[in-house]
Amino acid sequence: MAKQIVDNPFAPPGHDHASCILAALDAAEAACARRGERLTPLRRRVLELVWRGHRPVGAYDLLALLQDERGRVAPPTVYRALDFLCGQGLVHRLDSLQAFIGCGNTGDDRGGRVDGRHVAHFLICQDCGVAVEVRDGQLDGAISGLAGRAGFAIADETIELSGLCAACRD
Ligand SMILES: [Zn+2]
Ligand SMILES: [Zn+2]
Ligand SMILES: [Zn+2]
C-alpha cells in the first residue's frame, strides 16, 4: 500500500510544466528589474534551458543544447551566463551532481532568503534524478541559531539530501 505522503514537494509527473517555466522566467525578469540587472536574451535562454525539467542539468549539456540552436557557442559564454544566474539566485549549482537547477523560490515573498542570505535545501532523487528545493522554517531557525551561537557568518547554504522520492520508492 502506498504510504500517505503529506506535503510532497515533488511535482507530479503529469503536471503542466510549461507553466513552471513561464513562472520561473517571469519571476527572473521581475527580480532582475528590481535589482537593475539585465536578463539578456542569452541569460534568459540559458535559464529556460535549465528549467527544461526538474532534473539538474550539466553545463556541457546546456552548451550542447545552445549549440544545437545557435551553431558555435564558446563554453565561457555558457559559464558566464550560469555565473550570472547563480549570482542572482535564479539557479543553484548542486555540487554533488556538478549540475544546475532552477531556483524554486524566486517567486516567494522572501525570494528564498533567510536573514538576507539565499538558502538552498534540496531533496535529490537518485533514481529519477528529480531535485526539489524545499523550505522548512524550523530548519532555517535551527541553522541560523547554530551559526549565531558559533559566531559564524554563513556565506553559502546549500544542503543536498540524496535518496529516493516517494514515487521511486513504490
Ligand atoms: Zn514543472
Ligand atoms: Zn533557491
Ligand atoms: Zn524519484
Image: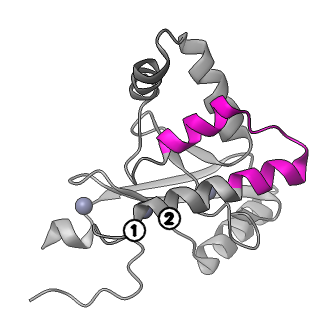
Where does the magenta region start and end? 28-50
Residue bearing the label numbered 2:
19
User: Considering only vertical position in the picture, is 135 above or below 155?
Assistant: below
Query: Who's the residue at 37% across and 49% down the image?
Result: 55
Q: Residues within 10 Å of mark 2 (few under 14, many from 20)?
A: few
Query: Who's the residue at 78% across and 56% down the image?
Result: 30
Q: Are the residues tagged 2 and 1 within 8 Å (C-beta)?
A: yes
Kindly identify which numbered label has been placed on residue 16. Answer: 1
Q: Amino acid at mark 2?
A: Ser
Instruction: Specify whether 3 is left or right of 112.
Output: left
Q: Could you say where residue 32 lies in the image, as x and y percent from the top left?
A: 80, 48
Quarter of the image with the C terminus is bottom left
Instruction: Give the quarter of the image for residue 88.
Output: top right
User: Considering only vertical position in the picture, is 94 above or below 110?
Assistant: above
Instruction: Give the quarter of the image for residue 161.
Output: bottom left
Secondary structure of the residue carrying tag 2 is helix
Q: Could you say where residue 140 lies in the image, as x and y percent from the top left?
A: 65, 71
Asked whether mark 1 lies closer than 8 Å to ligand 1, one says yes
Q: Residues within 10 Å of mark 1 (few under 14, many from 20)?
A: few
Residue with the most extreme left position: 1
Q: Amino acid at mark 1?
A: Asp
- 13 within the magenta span: no
- 47 within the magenta span: yes
